[in-house]
Image (cartoon, grey):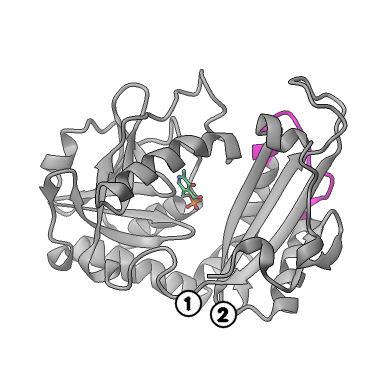
Amino acid sequence: MIPFDRRTGEIWLDGRHVPWAQARLHVLSHGLHYASSVFEGVRVYGGAPFLLREHVARLRASARLLDFDLEHDDDALHAATLDVVARAGIRDGYVRMNAWRGSEVIQTAALHTSVHTSVAAWEIPAGYYAAADALDQGIALRTAEYRRPSPQFAPVKSKAAGNYMIGTVSKNQALRAGYDDALLLDDAGLIAEATGAHLFFTRAGVLHTPTTRCTIDGITRAQILELARRANIPCTVEDLSPDFVREADGAFVCGTACEVLPVSRIDDHTYEPRRNDLVRRMVTGYRALTTSGEAARAWGR
Ligand SMILES: Cc1ncc(COP(=O)(O)O)c(C=O)c1O
């Protein structure tokens, strides 16, 4: 894989399309030093960014939670994204939007900095987010040592770069131990999420998912809840203790990047993803949404 800073194409930076190599920030940027930085990831299916309005709205809300405002309105960011995707001719890919504080001050308080915004997009090579057989075989999760902080201790609803250090360390450790991802508990020891995806369990024909008390409000999770509602599949949103891993008969993760992936193992407890009808229905149901444009229509676009 070519490193991201060596690729070619164009990136939208602060209102202009610039050559990929010139989309740079200075090392003395507040966003780098103090993590005053937020981002979004959007999937592109058949040339169309999926649920783009929701992602742009969350980017704005994430920035507000870190006490800064984006310098472009939703329509401008929407148009910039469509433009970046179209100029690069992306059919099935990924959009990364970032916003961060600039270089006017290098100290904790940052009342008067500029705010920068970028939009970049690229095709996703097969197998980038999960091994080719993961849809069939499922992925293995390892309970992480770090926990998601409570809303009193961090801006957990912000898709803030700073919140991701927990995920990076936890996923690195999980990969080194031979797993595919980490399962994060929250401050109270309840099941929270994976490092870049929300988690659902199945038990006797019912879907169970933790609350989002300590996580971002997942855009994919909302789609899964809506899919279940439309298919009359009972679904409960509740506090789930780690014991639930053994009580469940199956599990899957869901997120923009990984889509819906069955889980085959959590620590030493195994599931049979291929025999789990509910998990399969959610995999195919979400696939149908992303390939048919049905979700976009349902939300009035
Ligand atoms: C930590 C974390 N949790 C959950 C998710 C899933 O959220 P979404 O479905 O909105 O992509 C993501 C991905 O954005 C994430 O990074």
Rendered image: mark on residue 46: 2
Q: Which residue is painted at 62% across and 63% down in the image?
A: 4
**Bounds of the magenta segment:** 61-75
Q: Position of residue 74 (x, y in %)?
A: 76, 53
Give amino acid for label 2.
Answer: Gly
Toward which corner of the image does residue 260 lie, by quadrant?
bottom left
Asked if one can make out residue 31 in the rendered structure from this viewpoint, the answer is yes
SS at badge 1:
helix
Kindly check if marks 1 and 2 are in contact, taking CB atoms under 8 A apart as contact: yes
Give amino acid for label 1.
Answer: Thr
Query: Eyeballing the image, is 5 above or below 92?
Result: above
Classify residue 92 as left or right of residue 134. Answer: right
Q: Which residue is painted at 67% across and 48% down in the image?
A: 57
Spatial CA span between label 1 and label 2: 7 Å
Q: Position of residue 105 (x, y in %)?
A: 84, 27
* Quadrant holding the C terminus: bottom right
Classify residue 209 as left or right of residue 242. Answer: right
Toward which corner of the image does residue 224 lie, by quadrant?
bottom left
Query: Eyeballing the image, is 276 above or below 36?
Result: below
SS at badge 2:
loop
The residue wearing badge 1 is 291
